[in-house]
Amino acid sequence: MKKILILFCTLFIGAASAQEIRTIKLPELEQLINTNTGSLKVFNFWASWCGPCVKELGYFNALGTQGDTQVILVSLDFPEDIEKARRILEKKEVGLSTYLLDEKDYDKYITSIDNSWSGAIPATLFIDKKGNRYFYESSFEKQELDNVVNKLTSK
C-alpha cells in the first residue's frame, strides 16, 4: 500500500508541475496582443528546434517573474511537437504563460505581428503601457534584453 501511495504522490506532483502550453489560433493571439494591461507586455516567438530561442528562454523567464512586465511565450512548433516544447520549458524551469500558435498561413500571422518580420526566429514583440509596439527580429543576450525593457518602461 505504501508503494502505491508513493507512486500516486510522485505522479500527482509531476503532473501538477507540468508546463501548460495552450494551443491557440491567430484571432486569440491578436486578442492577447491588443489587450492593454497598462504595463509592458512581451511576446517572444520561439520554437523547440531553434537553438538561439531555447538559449534565451531563461532570460525571458527571469524578466517575467520580476516586476510589472508580462511575458508571453508563443511557440511556433508544429502541434505534433508540443511535447518536445513542453519538455524544454520544464528542463529550463520556465513557468511563463505559453501558447502554441496553430496556424498554417505563415504570411498571414507574420504580417499581423509586424510588417517588417521576415518570419525568422527568435523574434520578440514589446508593447509598452501606451500600446506602442516595438519589434525585434533577433536573439537577445540578458543585458540587451534588460536594456530594451528599461528603455521601454522608463517612457
Image (cartoon, helix red, strand yellow):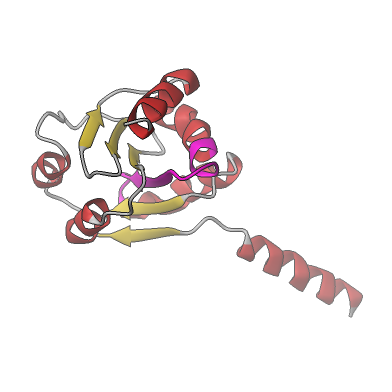
In the rendered image, which quarter contains the N terminus?
A: bottom right
- Nearer to us in this view, 93 or 6: 93
Number of numbered callouts drawn: 0
Whether the magenta-drawn stretch holds residue 75 is answered as: yes
Name the residue furthest front. Answer: 155
Q: Position of residue 60 (x, y in %)?
A: 46, 36
Q: Position of residue 97 (x, y in %)?
A: 44, 53
Taking the spot 35% from the left edge, 42% from the top edge, the residue there is 40
Q: Position of residue 79 (x, y in %)?
A: 32, 54
In magenta, the rendered stretch is 62-78
In the rendered image, which quarter contains the C terminus?
A: top left
Taking the spot 83% from the left edge, 69% from the top edge, the residue there is 6
Q: Is residue 155 rendered to the left or right of residue 2?
A: left
Q: Is residue 86 rendered to the left or right of residue 110?
A: right
Whether the magenta-drawn stretch holds residue 64 is answered as: yes
Taking the spot 41% from the left edge, 45% from the top edge, the residue there is 71
Vertical order, 129 against 37 (above or below):
above
Name the residue furthest right. Answer: 2
